[in-house]
């Protein structure tokens, strides 16, 4: 295999992401209504009619049905196709991000299927991470509640996955693994190099404790009890020193968003605002463009 078939992978990941996005939307809606997630068949929210297979195709069904149920003609929520499209784009961006990591493509040249699967493991993990973060943030926006069960599942998957990556790289080094968490460039530029899983654990502790202290000081008025756990999860998957950029960006974005919501009358000054989505957005920005954001920031400071 001389090179990766890039565009077919992009296409596959987008459509796979739309399927996952559709499922996540179902999880959100059924969790809100205390319905069984897996066993309950897909149905119209208005008339309860069971949906046919062709009515369950992500994006296509919404367009084909013109946004209405084929039975009762009630409007289908536009949140459905938005969720499907958003997760599809996120899946594509994840693979694009890994293509920016040095030696990622070369890790697949002239290797057997086992090594290909090992090399794709970080990509698979991040597809899972993003799915969980999307689910948690959307549910938090809609209900001001964190889905603890899914967040716990994220912790378990990330601990097992990142631990496995650390062991693989320790006993059978893979070059691009050394660049996996260097989201801000070389970690040694600001901090001493922190190997593998230890970087993850330190990132989790820093993020969790930072938000937990804010919750404690403000007695839960500034942030909810679930926010430290969201931050801890994101801090774990990003590692150190990326966790510092993640916290900084999250508060900048969250503060600006709250200011705009108050300015346009969407929220009152003392009204609670879900902060989980801003933590998620800050974490994703660091993962996708952390080094570029840091370079832009320092260029701005130096010019000033």
Image (cartoon, grey):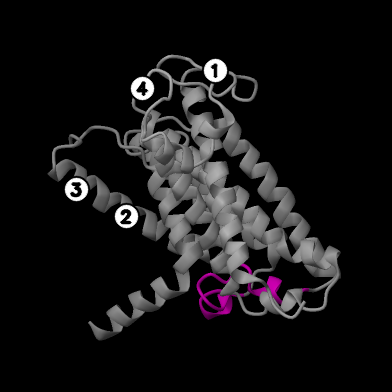
Q: Disc 2 designates what residue?
A: 253
Asked whether 211 or 294 is in front, the reply is 294
What residue is disc 4 on?
Answer: 73
x and y percent of residue 295 in the render?
Answer: 40, 78
Tell me which corner region of the image, top left, top right, bottom left or bottom right, holds residue 126: bottom right
Q: Which mark is residue 260?
A: 3
- Picture disc at residue 35: 1
Q: Which one is in front in this view, the residue at disc 4 or the one at disc 1? A: 4
Picture residue at 66% right of the left edge, 54% below the top: 125
Q: Residues within 10 Å of mark 2 (few under 14, many from 20)?
A: some
Judging depth in this view, the residue of 208 and 14 nearest the camera is 14
Q: Which range is magenta? A: 174-192
Name the residue furthest top.
Answer: 47
Q: Which residue appears at 51% of the width and 21% of the height? A: 43
Circle 1: element type: loop
Of the image marks 2 and 1, the number of the one nearer the N terminus: 1
């Amino acid at each position: 295999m001389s090179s990766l078939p890039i565009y077919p992978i992009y296409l596959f990941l987008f459509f796979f992401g739309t399927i996952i996005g559709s499922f996540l939307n179902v999880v959100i809606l059924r969790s809100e209504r205390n319905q069984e997630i897996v066993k309950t068949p897909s149905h119209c929210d208005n008339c309860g009619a069971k949906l046919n297979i062709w009515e369950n195709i992500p994006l296509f069904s919404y367009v084909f049905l013109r946004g209405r149920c084929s039975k009762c003609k009630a409007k289908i929520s536009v949140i459905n196709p938005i969720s499907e499209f958003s997760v599809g784009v996120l899946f594509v961006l994840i693979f694009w991000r890994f293509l920016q990591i040095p030696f990622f493509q070369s890790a697949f040249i002239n290797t057997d299927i086992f090594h290909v699967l090992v090399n794709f493991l970080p990509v698979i993990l991040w597809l899972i991470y993003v799915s969980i973060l999307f689910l948690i943030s959307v549910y938090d926006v809609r209900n001001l509640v964190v889905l603890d069960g899914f967040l716990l599942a994220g912790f378990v998957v990330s601990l097992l996955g990142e631990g496995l990556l650390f062991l693989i790289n320790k006993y059978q080094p893979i070059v691009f693994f050394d660049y996996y968490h260097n989201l801000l460039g070389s970690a040694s530029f600001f901090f001493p190099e922190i190997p593998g899983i230890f970087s993850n654990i330190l990132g989790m502790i820093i993020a969790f404790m930072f938000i937990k202290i804010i919750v404690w000081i403000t007695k839960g008025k500034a942030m909810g009890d679930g926010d430290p756990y969201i931050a801890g999860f994101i801090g774990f998957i990003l590692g150190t020193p990326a966790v510092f950029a993640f916290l900084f960006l999250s508060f900048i974005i969250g503060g600006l968003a709250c200011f705009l919501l108050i300015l346009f009358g969407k929220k009152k000054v003392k009204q609670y605002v879900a902060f989980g989505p801003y933590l998620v957005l800050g974490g994703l920005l660091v993962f996708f463009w952390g080094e570029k954001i840091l370079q832009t920031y320092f260029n701005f400071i130096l010019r000033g």
